[in-house]
Image (tube, rainbow, N blue to C red):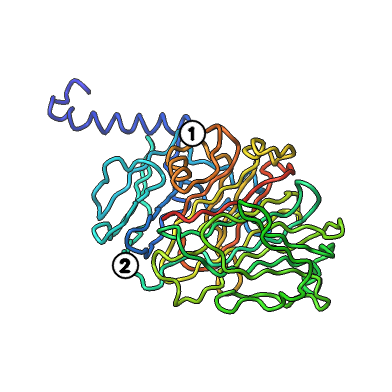
Amino acid sequence: MLRNINRSSFSIVCPVFLAIVAATVDLARGVTPPEVGQGPCSQTIEEGATVVFSVDAVDDSQNPNVDGNTDIGAAASQDSDHGGEATKYQWLRGGTPLVGASESVLIIKNASSADAGSYRCSLSNSAGSVLSEVATLHVVKASIPGRLIRMSCRTFSGLGEDRLTAGFVIGSTSMLGQAPVSMRASGPGLLDQGVERALPYPALVLRDTSGVIALCRGWAGERKLAAGNTGTVEKPDALGRDSALNRALPCGAYTAEIFGDKGDTGFADAQILDASLPSQWVPGAAHLVNASIRSPVGLGPNVPVMRFSIGGSTSITLLIRGMGPALRSLGISRVLETPSLLLYRINGDSSQTWLQSNTRWGGKHYLSDIARKVGAFPWKSDLTADATILLTLPPADYLLILAGANGETGVALMELYEIP
């Protein structure tokens, strides 16, 4: 019968026939069309800022919940392969493909009104393609731009390299000026919240690059937290054993270390809060641009959980890192071998919405470039088992969990960097 098909007919039938054969081959080797697991989100950002749109092909039915009912390691290390074939990405603006935008992440630097519009991503493989939902970008001149205003972490504080350590950086466009900061170390104050094994006598020491600049052993003389945008702060221990420091700090890097003043150990809550008023949140002003927590990572309730807040009227972009193996170069021996990061938004009803997870950052070039741009601690190898998330987030409260992907334990570091 094939001999009865003329040449013009064959030119029509042949591609169809080949497509059917290709689809049959794909099915035979287990290739399935990609599915959008987490799509890009609409954002409103300040003019001149960086915005990141991201999409993945992960089935969101496998997303872990905040109670850990899904295996953390399996969920955080999912990739976008379907039947062994990697998903291809193509970003579009207003329906037009963007040249060179062929990764799961689209980064727009120094955004202007010309970048405003609608964005979506096409995900494809040999078995088919799918379009993500549309994300709209608004670029504005904000009178109260978004900023990181609070970071807190409740975790175990031990001895030596297991001490709970919070690092932070105050920065501005000119690296001049100062910002009021409130720091707190809660131990006994956690007992009323049902936390057992709280650190009995938490001491708080503040250091800059020159050495110790402040020390608090209990609330004496430091009971009053700085006024302003400090968020919700629990009542201090009635006996004054919790510690706090309130300081106006010039631009620079600082370390707040929490430890048992009498050689004691236990659970503690470290808080770093921007105590400035919203009226002072003008573009380019000094503010909190980096925050981190170094802590031992255990299992179950011994997994560190960081809570952070973004204030203002616009979204900001954060580079979030979970470091384990990279800490060896800092002289820390018992590191968390395979850290997994899990990020959630805290909703108005206190429920949590999963946003993104990562295990093994994979040496992606754009992550290395951004880390260098913000002065993040360099990793010596692109093949480290450390974790990274790059995301633009609107003003809200967020939860970040750091755990061992394979149930291991060790010392690790969680970091937040604001990307200008």
| 281 and 64: which is toward the camera | 281
Identity of the residue drawn at 77% across and 55% down: 157
Q: Please report contact status of discs 1 and 2: CB closer than 8 Å, yes or no.
A: no
Check disc 1 and report the residue beneath it: 30
Sequence-wise, the earlier of marks 1 and 2 is: 1
Check disc 2 and report the residue beneath it: 140
Quick one: quadrant of the N terminus?
top left
Residue count near mark 1 (Cα–Cα under 10 Å), binned few <14, some 14–19, many ≥20 = few
Identity of the residue drawn at 35% across and 29% down: 21
Identity of the residue drawn at 32% across and 62% down: 47
Q: Amino acid at mark 1?
A: Gly
Q: Amino acid at mark 2?
A: Val
Identity of the residue drawn at 50% across and 76% down: 277
Residue 36: image x %, image y %?
44, 50
Residue 323: image x %, image y %?
62, 44
Please identify the quarter of the rendering in which residue 113 is found: bottom left
| 237 and 248: which is toward the camera | 248
| 172 and 268: which is toward the camera | 172
Q: Residue furthest top?
A: 3
The mark total stands at 2
In the picture provided, is 97 more to the left or to the right than 69? left
